[in-house]
Amino acid sequence: MKAAVFSARRYDKAMLARANVEAGHELLFLDERLTAASAPLAAGCAAVCVFVNDTVDAEVLALLAAQGTLLVATRSTGYNQIDIAAAERHGIAVVRVAEYSPYSVAEFAVGLLLAVNRKIARASVRTREGNFDLDGLMGFDLHGKTVGVIGTGKIGTIFARIMLGFGCAVVGYDRYPSAAFEEMGGRYVPVEELLACSDVVSLHCPLTEDTRHIVNAAALARAKRGSILINTSRGGLVDTVAATEALKTGQLGGLAIDVYEQEASLFFQDLSSAIIRDDVIQRLVSFPNVIVTGHQAFFTEEAIGQIMQTTIASFTAFERGEALANRVTSG
Ligand code: NAD
């Protein structure tokens, strides 16, 4: 099957090509993000493979359908960038990678927490310049603190287990509570209570209309003063402007984000020689108690290998007319 692979970075090309050795699909790698303007590049491709910041809205899906695309495969777990109902109207099947190393993201969230609490990135910059002063680098013990996990699915559960290992009390909020979370020692509480009692809050729910800006000005006002917020899930879960205001007043004691509401025009590219016009992110990175990474929580050998294998398996299943194990539907 011929597949156009959008937003293809060097590692995407290498790892997807490796996963494709036996299957032998015809892969057309494209550096461009998928948008209405770049959609014609996929002409004649039965499959289109996308990533988190590609635009797969109703307009783009109509263009793809007119060119003969029958399958959209996202190389991610989250699929909030795809208009599923529009895809169904155009007869385009959508698949994702429902499962790949959840450890990749959970472990990175722990890394962000340690880095922001113990000021590890700041300390590293200092010592490179010969500054071994500890002033401004004080953190707090995680042992004995309360960690709130919003979304206790695959990643949230692993993050919670690691935090329990640190000797933290773990509280959770999920629309669909799981027995596994409680059995390991987590305790479900309403989201308002979670915010009020947690020294650290970590977001692990998907971005949906219900969860958009789940951390907004009102939620931040309810949060424990000085608490740390970690977001490795999706940028749209946090109202970034409200978070910036809460950082200014000290209501939010630290913020570490791997995802950002407006990341589509910034992330996955080297803009170090460009003028960045996004004042919100520029203000954020200026805080000493903020860490921003460019959507890299998934980026481990194990995770990428599984993502590419699943994607190739979806192409093969689709071509053979078999059931699609990772299909996403609006129902
Ligand atoms: P999952 O489906 O296993 O878990 C998500 C959990 O969120 C579920 O338990 C679900 O019940 C819960 N949830 C759904 N709606 C909710 C709501 N309104 N309020 C509270 N909880 C709600 O998914 P996962 O594999 O753990 O992934 C979680 C998220 O992590 C993904 O949706 C994706 O956005 C993000 N992610 C980020 C990266 C990265 O590189 N930064 C990589 C993979 C996944």
Image (cartoon, grey):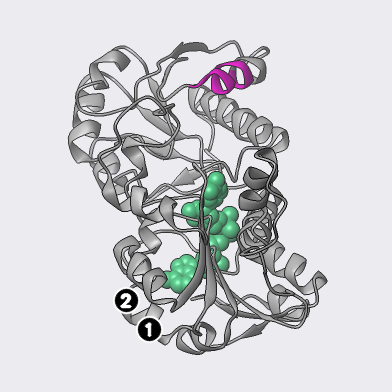
Residue 216 lies in what quarter of the image? bottom left
Residue type at numbered disc 2 = Ala
Q: In this view, does 214 lie above or below 276?
A: below
**Marks 1/2: CA distance?**
6 Å
Other residues around mark 2 within 10 Å, as few (<14) / some (14–19) / many (≥20): some
What span is colored magenta in the figure? 9-16
Res. 72 in view: yes
Residue 167 on image: x %, y %: 80, 77
Residue type at numbered disc 1 = Ala
Residue 126 on image: x %, y %: 64, 47
Query: Could you say whether the residue bearing mark 2 is in a helix, strand or loop?
Result: helix
Q: Mark 2 points at which residue?
A: 217
Q: Is residue 142 left or right of residue 296?
A: right
Q: Name the residue under label 1.
A: 221
Nearer-the-camera pick, 217 or 237 = 217
Q: Is the Cβ of the residue at disc 1 closer than 8 Å to that at disc 2?
A: yes
Q: In this view, does 122 lie to the left or right of 233?
A: right
For image coordinates 40% across by 23% down, the residue present is: 6
